[in-house]
Image (cartoon, coloured by chain):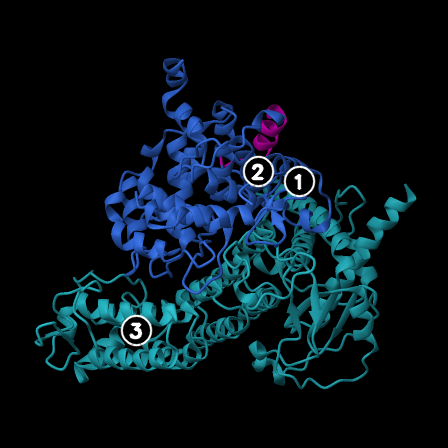
Amino acid sequence: MAEEEDSWQHGVRLVLHLDSILEGDPYIDEIGFVHPSQLESLHSIGNFALEHKKPFFMKTRRKAEGQGEADDTGQYAEDCSQRNEGHEVEAEPPGINPDQSYLNNVQGKFIDFSYDKSAFWCAHHKLAIAVSALAPIYEVARKEFLANRKAHAQCLTGTRNSVMSPSSLSFQLLEGGLCNRSANSRANGNGNVQFQGQNGAVHALLQKNLMLYSRVLVIVNCDFASAWNARKRVLSRMEATEEFLLAELRLARMVLAYGPKSEESWAYRRWIIDRMISAGLPWNTVGSVLEGDSMLVEAIAGRSRMNYRAWRHRYWLVSRMSLQQVASELQNTKRLAQLHVADNCCFHYRRCLLLGILQAGLMPNEKNVNSPTLVASRAQAGLSAALIVNPQLLTTLWKDELSWNRDLIKQFFGFEALWLHRRFLIWGFGHNSKIFKSASLPVVLNNNGSTTPLSEGGGIFSKSSSHC
Amino acid sequence: MGELYLDKHVAYIKSLDKKKDFDAVVMEHLRMSGAYWGLTALDIMGRLGDMNVDEIVSWILMCQDDCGGFGGNHEHDPHILYTLSAVQILALFDRVDAVDADKIASYISGLQNEDGSFSGDEWGEIDTRFSYCAICCLSLLKRLDKINLEKACNFVASCKNFDGGFGCAPGGESHAGQTFCCVGALAIGGALHHVDKDLLGWWLAERQVKSGGLNGRPEKLPDVCYSWWVLASLVIMERVHWIDRKKLEQFILDCQDPECGGISDRPDDAVDVFHTFFGVAGLSLLGFPGLAAIDPAYALPVNVVDRVFYGHKKQLAAS
C-alpha cells in the first residue's frame, strides 16, 4: 500500500515540476522524449552554444528489431494517422529550431528552481523528458484531468444563478513555489478534488487545474482529443486576449515539433486562428500568425516529408490570406518544390494556389473549378483589380508554371509528382477556355502536322503528342 | 509463403486488451476504433464467438455521451468517428437494438453543416471521413432520412480533384484513404454517378508499386492499409481487375508476423491491430480462402450487412 502511495506521489511531483518548467519558460519550442541515459548526458553538457541549424530532437520511428532506418522516415506509416509513433528519440546536438527563428530575440526566463533531473532537462527553450517519466506523469495527469473536468462541469451547473464577471476568471496562474500550488489544488489518491473557498474561487481554481492538467496531457499524448477540447471549452467562455491565444499557439507548435502529424494539434491551431478572427483581433496580428503558420508547415514539411496534415493546414490558411500573401506563397513554394520534386504535397499546394487564383478570376457565376480558397476572401477584390490591369495575367502564370514543370521533368525524369502536376496544368487549360482563350496559348501537335490550341478539345487522354 | 497464419492473428488480437505498457495506454482515446478493427477481423476469420458479447456491449454503452454520440473510451468526448465504430461493433453482435437509434441519428444530423459537410464533433473540424461516418452509420441505423443526403453527397462530390481522386476537404490532395471514404459514402448514399470511374480507377491502379503493395499517394511507400482503401474503392467501382491481385495478395501475406501473429504496414515492421484488420479485410476482398466475405462499402462482413437490412429472412430462405 505504501508503495502505491509513493508511485502516485512521484507522479504528482513530476506533473507539478513539468508545469513549473512550462510556466518558467513560456517560449519552449521543442520537446523530446529521451532515454534516461541521454538525459544524463544532456545534464553533463555545460554551457553550449546553439550552432546547428537542425531541430534539437529528432524522433526516430519505431521499427522492428534489426531493421535499419527507413530511407525516408517521412514516408514511414505516414498516412496511418492513428498509429502511435513511439517515444524513442535520439537527442541530436543542440541546434536552433528553424521554425522558431522569431524567438531568437526572446529571452526566456531561466529555470532557476530545482526540478527532478532524472526526469527533465530544460535549457535554451528546449525540454527533454525521460521516457521512464511518461507513464507516471500520464497516469496522474489523466486522473486529475478527469476529476477536475467533472467537478468543473458540476460547478458550472450548480452556480448557474450566481453572477461571475469575466475578470474573476482571469488566468493569472499562481507564481511562486510548488508548495503553494499543491496546497490549493492537490487531489487525493482517488482523484477526488477537495473544495475550498467560495464558489467563484472554486470555479477559478478548477479551471486553472483543468488548464494545468490538460496541458500536461497533450504534451505526453498529443492525440488525447478530450484534453484539447477542454481547453477550447475554457477559452470559449473567456475573453480572448491576443497574449493568451498566442500562448495556445505556442503550445500546439511545441507539440507539433515532436508530433508533426498530430491531427489534434493542427485542428487546435485552426480553432485558435478562427477564434482570433472572430474575436476581432487586429489584422496585422492575424496576418502574421497566418504567415508564421505557413512557415511552420514549410519547416515541418522539410523534415516530415509528404505530411498530409501539415499541408492540409497550409491550404486552409490560404482561404484566410490576402492576395499579396497568396502571390508570395506561390513564389516561395517554388524553391521548396524544386528541392523536393517527389513531394506531391508541395505541388498539390501550388495547384490549390493556382486554382484559387483561377477561380477568383472567373466570372462570379462560373463554378467549374474546384477550389474554396479565394472566392469569398479578401483576395478577390485585389485580383479583380490586377486582372483589369493585365488581362493576360492568368495565362502568363499558367504558361510559366508549365515551362518550369517541363524543365523540372527534363532534369528529374521519372518523378510521378512532376507528371501529375503537368497533367493538372494541361487539364486546367482544357477546362477553362474562357480564361485562357488566346492566340498565344501552347499548342498540341497533331498527327497530321496541324496544331490545336491546348484549350480546345483533347483531355489528358488525347492521342496526339503534346509539347509546350 | 502463401500461407495465412489465421490462428496466430486471432491470438494476437485477443492478447491486445491485456497490454498495459505505456504505448498501449496512450491509445486509450481511440479504443472504440481499435475494438472495431480487432472484432471485425475476428469475425472475418470466423472467431468472433470467442469474445464476451455482454461485456463488450455494456462497455460500448458506457462510452455514450448524453448528446447521443460515442467517445473513443469511457469518459472521452464524443466524436463521429467513434460513433460509427460503436454502431459497427453492435451490428457485428446483432445488438443494434441496445441503443436508441433516434438519439444517435439526432447527434449525427446535428453535425451536418449548411454546405452538406459534417463536422467531427462540436468543435467544427470538417473532413470527408466524417461524411462517410455519418452516411454509413445512419444507413446501418436505417435513418438516412434524418440528414440532407443530397447535400451530403454533393459536398463529397465537391472534394473531387482533377485526377478523379478525393481529398479531405474541397481542394484537398487526393488520398487513397479519403478516396475510400468518399466512394463508400457515395455508394451508400446512392450517388456513385459523381465518381468518374475510369479516371479514378486509373489513379487508384497507379497506387500499385513494384513489390505488389499499394500506396496512398504518388511517391509514397506501400502500406497494407491501402490494400483495403484502394481495393475496396476499386471493387465498388467494378475496376478491381485493373490491379495485379496476385501480387497484392503476396504483399499482404509477406506483412504477417509468423511468430507472434498480427500484420504490419510493410514486411518486417512491427505489427498492430489497425494493419492486422486491413490486411485481413484486403485478403477477404481478394477472395482468399477461409475468410468470410466483407462488404467493401460498410467494411463489415457481408452476412452482418445482410442481417441489418434483410433481417434473418435471408438466412432462413437459404436453409
Instruction: From the image, tell me which residue sits under label 3.
Output: A379
Q: Specify the farthest residue to the right.
A: A2
- Which contiguous range is marked in magenta? B53-68
* Residue at mark 2 to residue at mark 3: CA–CA distance: 48 Å
Q: Which chain is cyan?
A: A
Chain drawn in blue: B
Label 3 amino acid?
Ala
Is the residue marked by circle 2 packed among few (<14), some (14-19), or many (20+) residues within 10 Å?
Answer: many
Q: Chain of mark 1?
A: B
Q: Amino acid at mark 2?
A: Gly
B26 sits to left or right of B232: right
Same chain for labels 1 and 2? Say yes or no. Answer: yes
Q: Main secondary structure of the magenta part?
A: helix
Select label 2 or label 3 by which is in front.
2
Query: Magenta segment: does it hold A37?
Result: no
- Residue A341, percent from left and from top: 42, 75
Give the spatial CA distance, label 3 vs label 1: 52 Å
In the image, is A202 to the left or to the right of A311? right
Q: Assess whether mark 1 and mark 3 are in contact (beta carbons under 8 angstroms).
A: no
Q: Residue at label 1?
A: B16
Label 2 secondary element: helix
Q: Position of residue B224 (x, y in %)?
A: 50, 50
Which residue is tagged 2?
A: B38
Left or right: residue A359 versus residue A155 is left
